[in-house]
Amino acid sequence: METLLCKWILLGSLMICHAYVTFTNLKCVMVDKSFGDVKCHIKAVNRTHKYIDLTARLFKGPAENVTVNLKLMRYDHGYKPFFIDLSYDACKFMKNPKNPFVSSFYNTFKKNSNLNHTCPYDHDLIVDKLYTGNLERNFDNFPSMMNGDYAFFTEWFMNKIQRAYVNVYFRLTGSRDN
Ligand SMILES: *[C@@H]1O[C@H](CO)[C@@H](O)[C@H](O)[C@H]1NC(C)=O
Ligand SMILES: *[C@@H]1O[C@H](CO)[C@@H](O)[C@H](O)[C@H]1NC(C)=O
Ligand SMILES: CC(=O)N[C@H]1CO[C@H](CO)[C@@H](O)[C@@H]1O
C-alpha cells in the first residue's frame, strides 16, 4: 500500500482528479522565544477562498544547518501519521532539490515565499498568500486520499535543536474515493 501510494505521488501528474481543500486551523510556534518569533494566520477572502500568511523573524543571525521534519497526519480519533514522515536537510535540498516528497511539499509554497535560495537565510522568512488552491494542485497528485481532516505537521531544527513548528490543518473533500 505504501509503495503504491509513493508510485502514485511520482506518477501523480498522470492521474488527474479534483480535490477541494479548505484550511481549518493553523498553528505556528517558536519553541525557543529567544531564538526568534513567528506569526501566522488564515484569512478568508470569501466563503471558498482562504489563504495563509506567515512571517518568522530570527534574532540570532542567519539560519543555516536547517533540518525539517515533515509529517502528513490524518484525523481518526486524534491526528495520526499518514504515510509521510521524513526528516530532511533543508539546506541540502535547496542546493539540489531532488527528493520527490520534499519537492512536492516545497512546490506548494515556493512561489509565495522568499525562501527560494540556498542557505544561509539572513532575512525574515515569509510565506505570503498561500491559497488553498496551492494544496489542491498538490492533492490532485494523491488520488488515494480519502475525504477527511488532515494536517501537515512541520518541525524546524537548526543545529539539530528544534526551534519552531508549523502545523497546517485542512479538510479534503471531492477526491476520487468519494
Ligand atoms: C472568491 O475569491 C476568489 C479570489 O479573489 C475568486 O476567484 C472567487 O471567484 C471568489 N468566489 C466567490 C464565490 O465569490
Ligand atoms: C549541524 O549542527 C549539528 C549540531 O550542532 C552538528 O553536529 C553538525 O555537524 C552540523 N552540520 C553542518 C552541516 O554544519
Ligand atoms: C531551489 C529552487 O527551487 N530554486 C529555484 C528558485 O527559483 C528559480 C527561478 O524561478 C528556479 O530556477 C530555481 O530552480
Image: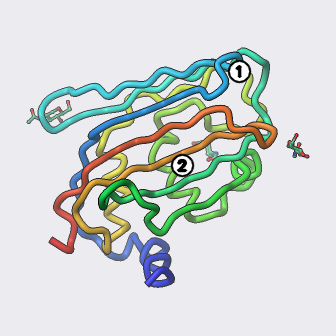
**Looking at the image, which residue is at 62% across and 38% down?**
116
Q: Earlier in the sequence, mark 2 or mark 1?
A: 1
Seen from the viewer's position, the closer of residues 44 and 77 is 77
Q: Picture coordinates of residue 178 (x, y %)?
A: 14, 71
Q: Nearer the viewer, mark 2 or mark 1?
A: 1
Could you tell me which residue is drawn at 48 percent across and 30 percent down?
28
- Tell me the quadrant of the picture where the N terminus can be found: bottom left
Q: Residue at x 30, y 61 (%)?
A: 76
On residue 106, which mark appears? Answer: 2
For this view, does 61 lie left or right of residue 175?
right
Spatial CA span between label 2 and label 1:
24 Å
Secondary element at tag 2: helix
Res. 161 image quadrant? top right
Tell which quarter ligand 2 is in: top right
* Residue 71 % position (x, y): 51, 56
Label placed on residue 35: 1
Q: Residue 170, how many percent across, how many down?
A: 30, 47
> Assess mark 1: CB under 8 A from ligand 2?
no
**In this view, 120 is above or below 151:** above
User: Is 79 in front, or is 127?
Assistant: 79
Residue type at tag 2: Tyr
Q: In the displayed orientation, state which residue is furthest to the left.
A: 47
Check disc 1 and give the amino acid type: Phe
Disc 2: residue Cβ within 8 A of ligand 3's nearest atom: yes
Q: Secondary structure at mark 1?
A: loop
